[in-house]
Image (spheres, rainbow, N blue to C red):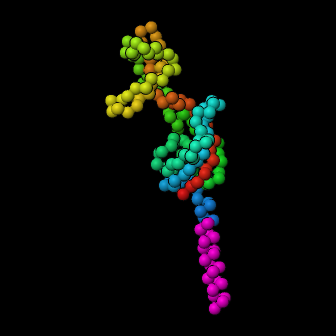
Amino acid sequence: MRKTGLTAALAVAMVFGAQVAMAQTVMIEDGKTVKIDYTLTVEGEVIDSSEGKAPLEYMQGASQIIPGLEKQLAGLKAGDKKTVTVAAADAYGEVNPAMFQEIPLTAFPPEVTPEEGMLIPLQGQDGRPLPAIVSEVKADTVVLNFNHPLAGKDLTFDVQVVEVH
């Protein structure tokens, strides 16, 4: 009787031990919820970071983060660190010339003097934010760029996987 009880206890311990070991080796794959700490740099300049904030949480395969980053995180586990460079085409895309629009300078309120690089917060017809960046100021017109500010740029992420479940 004593031998059977010991064998059963050992079997239970082995099953639970296997489950603990499995939990530590869960890899990032479609359908898994992932938490990462990251620092994003573009051309050597820090653009965004989770430092001092909660880790970024997303579901792998649900297109909640840029495709190039999601693809390169697949297969990593909690505790893994990786530097990932994402080409512009796999991030916010290349700069699209069709996303530039020239408008009359008179379309701006008199108290606003457009300057190159200025962010102009506009609204789309659906009421959603539609930011534009002043690309060029001419004598009578202003060229607005409606591309994402990171379009055409390669992105570098320093990532640490915090949790995968």
18 is within the stretch colored magenta? yes
- The location of residue 18, given as percent across then percent down, is 62, 69
Q: Dominant secondary structure of the magenta stretch?
A: helix
- The location of residue 152, given as percent across then percent down, is 53, 29
Q: Is residue 160 visible?
A: yes
Q: Nearer the viewer, residue 64 or 154?
A: 64
Task: Name the quadrant of the C terminus.
Answer: bottom right
Q: Which of 128 and 64 is in front in this view?
A: 128
Q: Which of 98 and 7 is in front in this view?
A: 7
Q: Quadrant of residue 143?
A: top left
- The location of residue 56, given as percent across then percent down, is 55, 46
85 is within the stretch colored magenta? no
Q: Quadrant of residue 139?
A: top left
Q: In which quarter of the image is residue 24?
A: bottom right
Q: Which residue lies furthest to the left in this view?
A: 125
- The location of residue 88, given as percent across then percent down, is 54, 34
Up-down relation of residue 46 to residue 51 (above or below): above
Which residue corresponds to the image point at 63% horizontal and 86% vertical from the top-left?
Answer: 5
Task: Name the quadrant of the N terminus.
Answer: bottom right
Which residue corresponds to the image point at 56% horizontal and 30% vertical from the top-left?
Answer: 153
Which residue corresponds to the image point at 63% horizontal and 65% vertical from the top-left?
Answer: 21
Q: Is residue 72 visible?
A: no
Q: Nearer the viewer, residue 51 or 60?
A: 51
Q: What range is drawn magenta here?
A: 1-20
